[in-house]
Amino acid sequence: MENQFEKYHLSEEIMDALNVLGYHVPTPVQEQVLPYALESKDILAKSWTGSGKTAAFAIPICEKVIWDYNIPQALVLEPTRELTVQVKEEMVQIGRKKRIKVADLIGGFPIDKQIRTIKQKTHVVIGTPGRVLDHIRRETLELSMVNTIVIDEADLMLDMGFIDEVKSILDQVSGKPQILLFSATMSDSILELARQYQQDAVSVILHAPEEMNAETFIEEKLYEVGLEEKYEMFRKVLIKENPEHAMIFCGTKEMVNVLCRKLGKDGIKCGMIHGDIDQGDRLRTIQSFRDGRIRYLIATDVIARGIDFEKLSHVFNYDFPTGRETYVHRIGRTGRNGAKGTAVSFVTPDDERMRQMVETFVSYKIPVEEFHELSQAEFIQFQNTQKEKPKARPKKGAGFDKEIMKLSIGGGKKSKIRSGDLVGAISNIDGVQADDIGVIDVRDSLSYVEILNGKGNLVLQALQERPIKGKLRKVKGGR
């Protein structure tokens, strides 16, 4: 199968990574963004969750990065810590064959460790506005070579009160960097931000509702229910649907806690994420859900916004959304890439006005379901599902795992080891070339090097007897 990304004349390293990741056909937003982004034009894009916009800006950034430069060449601003981590992972995968170093700057983690990381060779920085601005004010983040800035989920930035911080960051960057601005909606505030900082921006507009109906396979269901009966109705519908993996949306942090506790008492295990949960715990929960170790994830909109999960069979609106666009955002998480998905919403009398607004926005009536009592067979099937170990879901970039070994090498900056020393020692091994070397991370007393193309064992064995910086080093291999 011919890879349609070939038409963008990308480098061999980027094309190899896209093939491993299974990116063969550009999505509509990638079709419209890539040609202009590769030409370094400013872009103002209206794009929805699941449209493939991360790759739309990650591919041109990775393509244009010059490896030899040690300080950041691109800055990506994300509204949440979870999105920052997700976008970093995709950027690392796309830029892996070019050995692109990506640093994430988010709150909830020690700033000293981040300072040490960005003092090393760093090509791309991804972070939340508050923490990025903190580094700028401390003069620990060098911006003099930044030529591309991405403002992702700009409408959520606005909702969370980050726009002033975003403007402060943009004001700190000298010259005229390329600015790529992505937003699900185009409010007057977003358009004003674009007018103030972009130059002759190319406009890219994706119309989510029409696009969703034409290109995805989402079965929508709506249950009308009284507030007092909502939990019991939800529990029965959950049992009847018996989803493999599902996201459950609540309107508040308090309701996330209440629903998770109630489900737990009824023997239904689930994870939860919201803004009051410790950052490390949130990231671990998201990874457990992504890996398939957690079957159901309960979340608020702000925390879950933009986070991408593969092969999600169901979305439940336990609390009906309070915004028209939010409904489309939520249900668009299922039914992706040709797979069938189901979106189930619960509407109380208090939700009727918003239901009408959503139906006007999407231009169709959401089908109302009449609930039929559970059969014994349905209940038993659900219990059996709960007892089964959830199926592990395929990890994005898993194809790299077969051909990559990560080496840990005794010695780092304290031993005056630099990236060039490691590249020199490894590329002089018979049968190994510079393009077999992946990301290099030199720390104080240890260095980590990814060896690509299945040559890990060859390099591991050779370095047992080959000095680095005039001394034999202790070298271990792992995944």
Image (cartoon, rainbow, N blue to C red):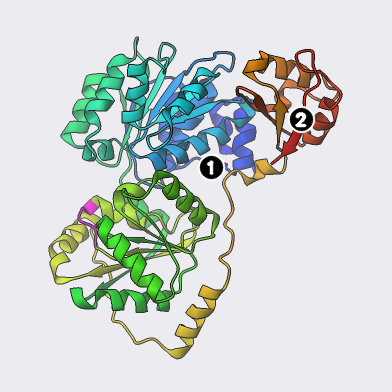
Q: Quadrant of the C terminus?
A: top right
The spot of residue 347 in percent (x, y) is 22, 69
Q: Marks 1 and 2: in contact by CB < 8 Å?
A: no
Badge 1 crowding class, 10 Å Cα cut-off, few under 14, some 14 to 19, many 20 or more, is few
Q: Is residue 198 visible?
A: no
**Label at residue 25:** 1
Residue 323 in magenta? yes
Residue at 64% from the left image edge and 40% from the top image edge: 20
| 140 vs 299, nearest the viewer | 140
Residue at 58% from the left image edge and 32% from the top image edge: 6
Check disc 1 and report its element: helix, strand or loop: loop
Q: Is residue 236 visible?
A: yes
**Label at residue 475:** 2
Residue at 55% from the left image edge and 33% from the top image edge: 92
**Residue 35 occupies which quadrant of the picture?**
top left
Indicate which disc, 2 or 1, sits on the residue closer to the N terminus: 1
Q: Quadrant of the N terminus?
A: top right
Badge 2 crowding class, 10 Å Cα cut-off, few under 14, some 14 to 19, many 20 or more, is some
Q: Left or right: where does residue 6 sit relative to residue 39? A: right
Q: Left or right: where does residue 250 sit relative to residue 38? A: left
**Residue 83 occupies which quadrant of the picture?**
top left
* Residues shaded magenta: 320-324
Predominant SS of the magenta segment: loop
Cα distance in 3D space between marks 2 and 1? 40 Å
Residue 204 in magenta? no
The spot of residue 316 in percent (x, y) is 34, 65
What amino acid does circle 2 point to? Answer: Val
The spot of residue 3 in percent (x, y) is 60, 38
